[in-house]
Image: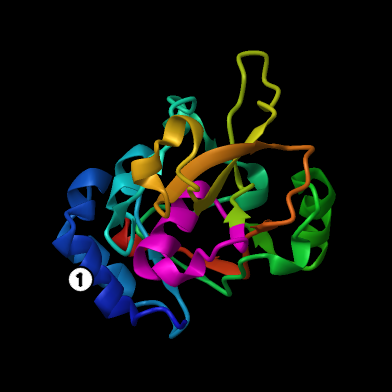
Amino acid sequence: MPLPSLTDQAHRLLDLGVHHLAGTTPDDVLGAAGRGGPDGLLVTAAPASALAPLLRLGDKEGFVVEDMTDVDDFRPTDAAAVPAAPYVVAGLDRGDAHLDRTPAETLPDLLAAGRSPLTLEEGLHWVLQDPDVLERNRCFMTIGSRLTKPDGAYDARTPALWISNGTGRDGKERKGAPKLGWCWWGNRHTWLGIASCGSRQARPAEDLP
């Protein structure tokens, strides 16, 4: 399903109060929306922990898995260098071609193709604007965000967005809800693609604070 127009995306973010979560102004959000193309996704600096509960699939509210209390410590990597927010992402791809491939295998191929792995916040904004991008057995990892450990190495987890089955600690009441969880960097999943984008549009220098 096509994304709403950038102007409609901006108004949805403002209606949800995302600009407050991101520490920005309505004018900044609307200004960024006016600079992107027709297939763009508007992204703010709102933290993942605050965005996840805003996701909806039907009447089910999004959530973060219980064992990911450090979700906001997952930051964009060098492979997913993001400009100052709010900004526009173009050329979104859910990564179905990378089903059953590990992030470690896929990242070099994305970079060689001139693409960039999607960050967690970008993935959350995508699902917020187009919930249908999450389908049963067709969801995605956002490997452009990693957690750096004190020794400088990356944590072995990578964030992902999928649909809860309502089992285990999720609770049966969350069956069918959008779920922010994690997967191992070296594991394959037949139902998780690896999302990417074609470009990120930076704000003009004169618009920066």
191 within the magenta span: no
Judging depth in this view, the residue of 148 and 62 nearest the camera is 62
Judging depth in this view, the residue of 80 and 14 nearest the camera is 14
- Disc 1 designates what residue? 11
Outermost residue toward the top? 151
Whole-percent x, y for residue 187 in the image: 77, 40
Classify 10 Å Cα crowding around label 1: few (below 14), some (14-19), many (20 and above). Answer: some
Boundaries of the magenta span: 118-139
Q: Residue at x 36, y 77 (%)?
A: 35
Q: Residue at x 37, y 54 (%)?
A: 85
Whole-percent x, y for residue 208 in the image: 32, 55
Q: From the viewer's perspective, is residue 54 above or below residue 1?
A: above
Q: Would residue 47 be visible to someone looking at this image?
A: no
Tell me if 88 is positioned left or right of 115 in this view. Answer: left
Q: Would residue 208 be visible to someone looking at this image?
A: yes
Q: Residue at x 58, y 38 (%)?
A: 182
Q: Residue at x 45, y 46 (%)?
A: 179
Q: From the viewer's perspective, is residue 88 above or below residue 44?
A: below
